[in-house]
Image (cartoon, rainbow, N blue to C red):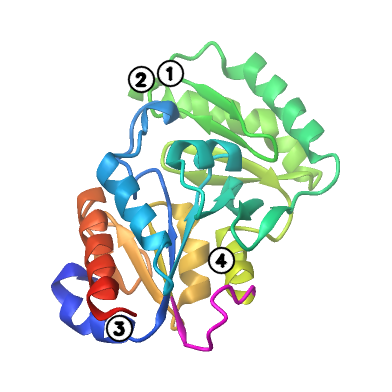
Amino acid sequence: MENLLRNWDLIKKELLDKNIFLFLDYDGTLTPIVGRPEDAVLSAQARGLLSSLSNLPSCRVAIISGRSVENIAAMVGLNKLIYAGNHGLEIRGQGVGSQIFTPDGFRDIIKGVRDLLLKACSRFEGVIIEDKGPTLSFHYRMSPEADIALIKGFFKESVKRRVAEGKIRIVEGKKVFEVRPAIDWDKGRAVQWLLDKGLFGDGRPVVPVYIGDDTTDEDAFRVLAGNGLTVWVGQGQKVETDYFLEDTGQVLEFLEKVRFLKIENGK
C-alpha cells in the first residue's frame, strides 16, 4: 500500500473531469484521536477546507462517524455537508433529508444495555459509556492498561445474553466496543445508499473517495473496492485500501490538493 500524496500526479488525472464524493471519518481522520470524545475539536483549517469543498459544484462531502448525527453535526457545524451518524444508522443533510435505519423500540434495548454496563463496569477507572440513542459506545481508552483485560471481560459478560438473543451485535474498534442493532447496516451500506441517491445530477461520472482510520471503516472500503478511492489513515494496519495517509495532517493536505485542483480547473 502506497502513500496517496506520493501518487498525487497519477490520482489527479482520475479526479480532474469527474465529480468527487468525499466520505470522511471524523475521529482519527479529521481530528487526532483523544481520550475524551468531546475533546476532538475540529481545527479552523479543517473546517475551512470542508466548507470550501462543499461549495464546489463538482464536490459533495459526507462525514461518516460513529458519533450520533446530532453530535457530529454540532462538532463540524457546516450546513452544506451530509452527516451520517452512528455508523450510518442516522443520515441527514442537503439533498437527503433526515433518515433513521434502526428497528422500532431499539432505543429501549440500548437503555437496558447501558444500565447493565453502568452496574457492571462503572467501578473501573477511565470507562466512558456513551448512549448515542440508536447505538451505544463503551470506551476504555483512558483506563489503566492493567485493567483492560478485566474490563473487556466484564463488558462481554454483560451483553452476551442479548447478543445470543439476536437483539444486538458488538463491533470492536480502537479501544471501544460499539453496541448496534442486529441488522445488516454499516458504514458501507450507508455509503452505497448515498451514492444511489444521485446527488450530482449532471451526468458526469462520480468518483467516491473514502478516508478512514478504524476497523468500522472497513465495511466502506469493501463496498468501494474497485469502484472508488479508498484511503487508510495511519501506518502498520493490514487493511485492503488503495492508498494510505500517515495522519490527520496528511488528510488535510490531500483535501487541499483536491480543492485547488477543482478551483484551478473550474470543474
**Residue 250 in magenta?**
no
Magenta segment main secondary structure: loop
Residue holding disc 4: 191
Q: CA distance from mark 4 to mark 2?
A: 36 Å
- The magenta-colored residue range is 197-207
Q: Amino acid at mark 4?
A: Val
Q: Earlier in the sequence, mark 1 or mark 2?
A: 1
In which quadrant of the rendered view does residue 252 lie?
bottom left
- Asked whether disc 3 touches disc 2, contact meaning CB atoms under 8 Å apart, the reply is no
Q: CA distance from mark 3 to mark 2?
A: 48 Å
Q: Earlier in the sequence, mark 3 or mark 2?
A: 3
Q: Earlier in the sequence, mark 3 or mark 1?
A: 3
Q: Earlier in the sequence, mark 4 or mark 1?
A: 1
Disc 4: CA contacts within 10 A as few (<14), some (14-19) or many (>=20)? many
In which quadrant of the rendered view does residue 53 lie?
bottom left
Residue holding disc 2: 144
Q: CA distance from mark 4 to mark 1?
A: 33 Å
* Disc 2 secondary structure class: loop
Q: Closest to the observer: 191 or 150? A: 191
Q: Closest to the observer: 174 or 61? A: 61
Q: Amino acid at mark 1?
A: Gly
Residue found at x 64% / y 23%? 117
